[in-house]
Amino acid sequence: MLKIDSHTHLIPETLPQWTQKFGYGNFIHLDHYRAGYARMMQGDKFFREIKSNCWDAEERIKEYRDFETQVQVVCTIPVLFGYHAQPLHGLEISEYLNDHIAGLMTKYPKNYIGLATVPMQDAELAIRELERCKKLGFKGIQIGSNINDKNLSEDEFFPIFQACERLDMAIMVHPWNMMGKGLMDKYWLPWLVAMPAETTRAACSMIFSGVLEKLPKLRVLFSHAGGAFIFTLGRIEHGFHCRPDLVAIDNNVPPSNYLGKFWVDSITHDADALRYIITKVGTEKICLGSDYPFPLGDLEIGRFITEMGLEEKDVENIFQNSIVDWLKLDLNSYK
Ligand SMILES: [Zn+2]
């Protein structure tokens, strides 16, 4: 069995000064202020400190060896999406980040699988970049839970989802640009409270608008175990049935019908929570995920799963088979 981590973040060691280049916006740049560490700066504002394992491909492979994990699915850090940029600038940012990951996949084909980023603010450019990334060997894309505050149910995103299905590119939905952020800055609440809500918002938007119904071959993973979606599905389902005039206006299929049709990762930090998710979607739809290398991640890369007393087949599903299905991988190319 291989162990494949479906959810990790990585960025290039250096980023262009996009704010200066484009003449607007607070794009992220890196301040390498001491060896092995960098400050992610959003304009003049400190965003987050990162360590070299955020950009050093070989250091990451070594760290993963301690957890017997051979393969990492990598994508950018959501704050770098660049959805707020003018479309052509957004494309330029996507190309830069995608070219970097493409380079890694070429250099370490057994260790890295890429999820690209595309300029979701412009469907035509997004599809152009999607097509290019398909040729570069990417298995899918990572997208935000909202696009500049617009929900994924908006018609303008549908052609991008359609293109993903046509090109056989999977989608990981990642929370970002958290709702209510300015109202709950204290206690890290955007990350602890709004992120699971963001993923729920995205899942409901894609289900109620009929994206998953119209595109049955689209392979979508909702990160952080689906956020709060699966845990609150009882309420969501009840709402669908008691107020169809509000909920079932674009798709008359109950939301529970989609359990087992999308994937989630295992990032729950809680064995009981994961057990509950297993009862709802089965281990065939749960992908090992870590959110490495960030502190809110499962930085022991699924060790708690091996201690849950699951059947061997279930562990194999979570560590390997579900990810193979989600990304349509050829296992032999990673052995
Ligand atoms: Zn993440």
Image (spheres, rainbow, N blue to C red):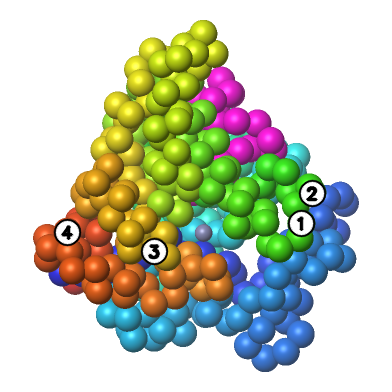
Q: Amino acid at mark 2?
A: Gly
Q: Earlier in the sequence, mark 1 or mark 4?
A: 1
| Amino acid type, mark 3 | Asp
Mark 3 or 1, closer to the camera: 3
Residue found farthest to the top: 245
Other residues around mark 4 within 10 Å, as few (<14) / some (14–19) / many (≥20): some
- Looking at marks 2 and 4 on the same chain, the residue that comes earlier in the sequence is marked by 2
Q: Nearer the viewer, mark 3 or mark 4?
A: 3
**Per the image, is 145 magenta?**
yes
Where residue 85 sits: x, y (%)?
74, 44
Position of the N terminus, as image quadrant, is bottom left
Instruction: Tell me: residue 308, above or below residue 300.
Output: above
Q: Nearer the viewer, mark 2 or mark 3?
A: 3
Q: Which mark is residue 270?
A: 3
What is the C-alpha distance between the residues marked 3 and 1?
A: 25 Å
| Label 3 SS | loop
The mark nearer the N terminus, 3 or 4, is 3
- The numbered mark, 2 or 3, whose residue comes first in the sequence reads 2
Q: Position of residue 33 (x, y in %)?
A: 76, 85
Report how far apart the C-alphas of labels 1 and 4 lie in the structure: 39 Å
Q: Are marks 2 and 1 in contact (CB under 8 Å)?
A: yes
Q: Which residue does the numbered mark 4 point to in the structure image?
A: 314
Please check the rendered image and state whether residue 290 is part of the magenta-colored stretch, yes or no. Answer: no
Compare residues 65 and 268 and report the one nearer the observer: 268
For residue 182, which numbered disc appears in the image?
A: 2
Count of numbered labels shown in the rendering: 4
Which residue shows up at 84% across the image and 61% down it? 43
How far apart are the two marked residues, 2 and 4, measured between alpha carbons? 41 Å
Residue 185 numbered mark, or none: 1
Instruction: Report the amino acid beneath label 1.
Output: Asp
| Disc 3 residue crowd, few under 14, some 14–19, many 20+, Cα 10 Å | few
Question: From which residue to which does the magenta span run?
Answer: 141-163
